[in-house]
């Protein structure tokens, strides 16, 4: 047994002062009020929150940070660079990059990541000796960084969608494709869950998966999390409308893809009917506010989706920043900018998105709350930093950043202490993983 004494702890109805959390075998065994630490308690200053779930990640996009803002910095600049990185990765370099990226997440309070994985095969096509070698690199990376992983293996078959139909894959995109949904499902069936790993599935988007292939992916995902990029840009809606005569949300609904195990990522450009369809089926929605801002996507109707019945989670997606507290704050402040109203999401709702809703989206019903029986995931956030000094504990999410996270416990194991990750200098790990990808060849 290990015990942590929390100066304040978020027990579901806001932070309360003086709480002892006892942990055994990676689970919380007791939560007690305790005005002062006892001998043997590890003292956690500030506010202790449940572990954060980063519900949408493309680990390799971390290599793009600070690399896509020249030459006009358009969406096309970003995409050209993303393909350049995608073309260079192999299982070893992918492991190094993902390990460092997941360690950066841990420093930000993330104890579980949903990896939306589509970089499956060798550059130029063909197959690795283990056709899941790139998936296994991600599994190893998460284990090394001490975070849990939900691997959302994405079906990706077409190079895009225009009014006339789907486009063929370009040279880089060929790495992403299994050929058809049956071959995708056959490859994915070779993976097995293990401690710290949950398997889910993903439809890259209606741009990359033709409607006739969708039911195969939905069937393969049965009982598991299913994620899909949805209506991130207006062009997707226009092409879908021209080719199929309906919105992407309607197309997914027709394929049986909506429901409580499904998470729509971005959900930026929706009609009122789309909002009703997502909310009415209990389909989750993952907002990625820093990415949506970086890529000039727009601001989705997240308050309306929540009110319609969609649980909201958060993701750092392309990792223009890895600061989950920042994502939560941006969810609220973006709403303020587009509606002219404050208080669209209460601080407690933002914490819910970071914790219990995020874990729900990734298939971990036993994580995201500080309660007996739950996984022992603790995130301690300073109340005495230059950013947070003077903030009320119950409003900390509107002030704190990743830099204010000082201790992180995942499944009972301390992976960050004093702001330092168990793997050491994460900046160095990131530089060593990223710089070779940009060297001239
Ligand atoms: Zn994405």
Image (spheres, rainbow, N blue to C red):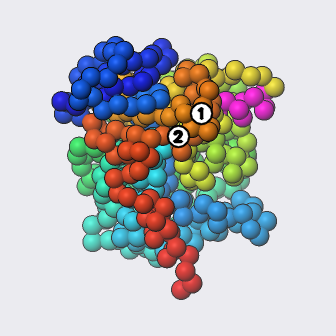
Residue 252 appears in the rendering: no
Q: Is residue 353 left or right of residue 148?
A: right
- Distance in Å between CA atoms under marks 2 and 1: 8 Å
Residue plotted at (64% across, 23% down): 345
Q: Nearer the viewer, residue 277 or 299?
A: 299
> Mark 2 — residue?
404
Secondary structure, mark 1, is loop
Number of marks in the image? Answer: 2
* Rendered location of residue 286, percent (x, y): 55, 37
Q: Evaluate if marks 2 and 1 touch, with contact meaning CB atoms under 8 Å apart.
A: yes
Eyeballing the image, is 377 above or below 98?
Answer: above
Residues shaded magenta: 331-339
Residue 81 location, quadrant: bottom right
Residue at the spot 74% in from the left edge and 68% down from the top edge: 70
In front of the other: 114 or 402: 402
x and y, in percent, of residue 35 in the image? 36, 15
Residue bearing the label numbered 1 = 388
- Whether residue 148 is visible, yes or no, is yes
Instruction: Report crowding for label 2: few under 14, some 14 to 19, many 20 or more residues within 10 A (C-alpha).
Output: many
The picture places residue 429, in percent across and down from the top left corner, at: 43, 64
């Amino acid at each position: 047994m290990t015990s942590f004494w929390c100066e304040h702890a978020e027990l579901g109805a806001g932070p309360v002062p003086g709480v002892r959390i006892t942990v055994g075998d990676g689970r919380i065994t007791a939560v007690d009020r305790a005005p002062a630490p006892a001998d043997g308690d590890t003292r956690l200053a500030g506010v202790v929150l449940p572990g954060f779930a980063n519900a949408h990640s493309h680990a390799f996009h971390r290599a793009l940070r600070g690399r896509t803002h020249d030459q006009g910095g358009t969406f096309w600049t970003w995409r050209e660079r993303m393909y350049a990185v995608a073309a260079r990765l192999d299982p070893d370099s992918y492991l190094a990059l993902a390990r460092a990226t997941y360690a950066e997440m841990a420093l930000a309070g993330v104890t579980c990541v949903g990896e939306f994985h589509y970089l499956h095969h060798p550059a130029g096509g063909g197959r690795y000796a283990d056709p899941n070698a790139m998936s296994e690199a991600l599994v190893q990376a998460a284990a090394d960084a001490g975070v849990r992983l939900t691997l959302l293996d994405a079906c990706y078959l077409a190079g895009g969608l225009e009014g006339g139909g789907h486009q063929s894959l370009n040279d880089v995109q060929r790495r992403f494709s299994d050929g058809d949904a049956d071959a995708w499902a056959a490859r994915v069936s070779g993976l097995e869950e293990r401690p710290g790993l949950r398997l889910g599935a993903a439809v890259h988007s209606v741009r990359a998966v033709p409607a006739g292939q969708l039911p195969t992916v939905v069937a393969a995902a049965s009982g598991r999390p299913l994620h899909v990029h949805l209506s991130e840009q207006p062009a997707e809606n226009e092409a879908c409308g021209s080719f199929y005569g309906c919105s992407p949300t309607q197309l997914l609904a027709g394929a049986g893809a909506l429901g409580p195990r499904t998470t729509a990522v971005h959900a930026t450009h929706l009609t009122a009917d789309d909002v009703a369809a997502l909310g009415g089926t209990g389909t989750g929605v993952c907002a990625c506010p820093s990415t949506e801002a970086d890529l000039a996507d727009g601001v989705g109707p997240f308050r309306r989706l929540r009110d319609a019945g969609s649980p909201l989670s958060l993701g750092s997606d392309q990792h223009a920043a890895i600061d989950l507290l920042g994502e939560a704050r941006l969810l609220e402040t973006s709403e303020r900018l587009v509606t002219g109203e404050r208080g669209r999401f209460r601080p407690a709702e933002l914490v819910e998105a970071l914790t219990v809703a995020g874990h729900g989206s990734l298939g971990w019903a036993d994580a995201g709350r500080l309660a007996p029986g739950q996984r022992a995931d603790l995130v301690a956030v300073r109340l005495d930093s230059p950013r947070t000094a003077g903030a009320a504990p119950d409003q900390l999410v509107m002030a704190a950043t990743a830099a204010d996270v000082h201790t992180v416990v995942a499944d009972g194991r301390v992976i960050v202490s004093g702001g330092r990750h168990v793997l050491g200098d994460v900046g160095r790990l990131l530089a060593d993983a990223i710089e070779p990808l940009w060297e001239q060849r």
